[in-house]
Amino acid sequence: MNSKNKDYSAFDQPSIMQFLFNPRPEMGETSTAATYKEILIPVGEGVIIGSRFYAVDKSAPVILFFHGNGEIVEDYDDLASFYGRMNVNFLPVDYRGYGKSTGRPSVSTMMRDSHEIFEYVTTFLKSEAYSGPLIVMGRSLGSASALELATMYQNRIDGLVIESGFAFALPLLQLIGIDTTRLGITEEQGFSNFDKIKSFEKPTLIIHAEFDHIIPFSDGKYLFDNSPAKDKNLLMVRGANHNNIFALGLQEYLQSIQGLIGLLSRD
């Protein structure tokens, strides 16, 4: 499936983008036990994307992470410390207008930028002699970027993690009051996560809260059921919702990721 040149402009309408994107700047220095290297990624048009690389070991796995729509990489300082103790290199990236990134976000640029980010990051890792497996991970809105890359670069990605991800965009938009019929948009014009998951056959982990009030658990279940991966796992974080999934399920959340890494080291 080749989606690299897909036209996403139907989803760039203001009424949709004001829901999908909630950019905010980085607040400055943060107190974190995890050390990091700031990486500014050029994506064209004079725009740079902010990211942080929490490196621990050049032979350890690397997680390239796309976050949710109301988050910035700075928010993941604490989680990066947990990954460090797991001997995992963690590289969260922002979207246009988020954190230290320049530009303004849109669906079209987000999807296009994911390719530029992937190429930059993989080139950087190679130049710095990082040799561990590469895992692409997306949370919530970030599931679209992660699945886009998984579809396009399966031969260069070793594992996939989708957390609180959506299979279908239209029900999500309708939930918050957008009249998708009036706008004349279809699922096929959007992210097509429901279809992209069907092309990634390497180890896959789906994590979803039992009572997610924004993206229902059924979306995560659909992604899991339609994944063709021989090695796949579905973690339902019981009692949790979209916003407290870390707080209520952190231990099993990290254990499931460790389990995915174990599959990669076995191969």
Image: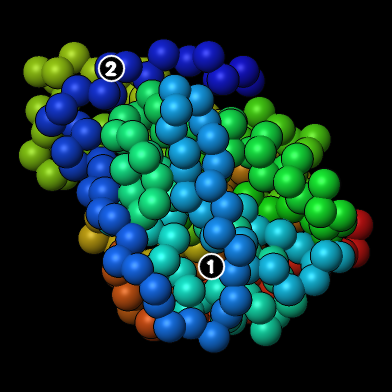
Label 2, residues with CA under 10 Å away: few <14, some 14-19, many ≥20: some
**Residue 28 point in image, percent of width and height:** 35, 68
Q: Quadrant of the C terminus?
A: bottom right
Residue at (63% x, 20% y) in the render: 1
Instruction: Return the residue at label 2.
Output: 10
Is residue 202 shown left or right of residue 19? right
Task: Find out whether the residues at labels 1 and 2 contact each other: C-beta distance under 8 Å.
Answer: no
**Residue 202 point in image, percent of width and height:** 75, 46
State the SS at label 1: strand
**Residue 102 point in image, percent of width and height:** 36, 40
Residue at (13% x, 30% y) in the render: 15
State the SS at label 2: helix
Is residue 78 shown left or right of residue 129? left
* Callout count: 2
Q: Which of 205 and 53 lies nearest the eye of the viewer?
A: 53
Instruction: Return the residue at label 1.
Output: 235
Residue at (59% x, 69% y) in the render: 36
Tag 2: amino acid:
Ala
In the image as oriented, which residue stretches furthest toward the right?
267
Mark positioned earlier in the residue sequence (1 or 2): 2
For discs 1 and 2, the disc positioned in front in the rendered view: 2
Specify the quadrant of the image occupied by residue 123: top right
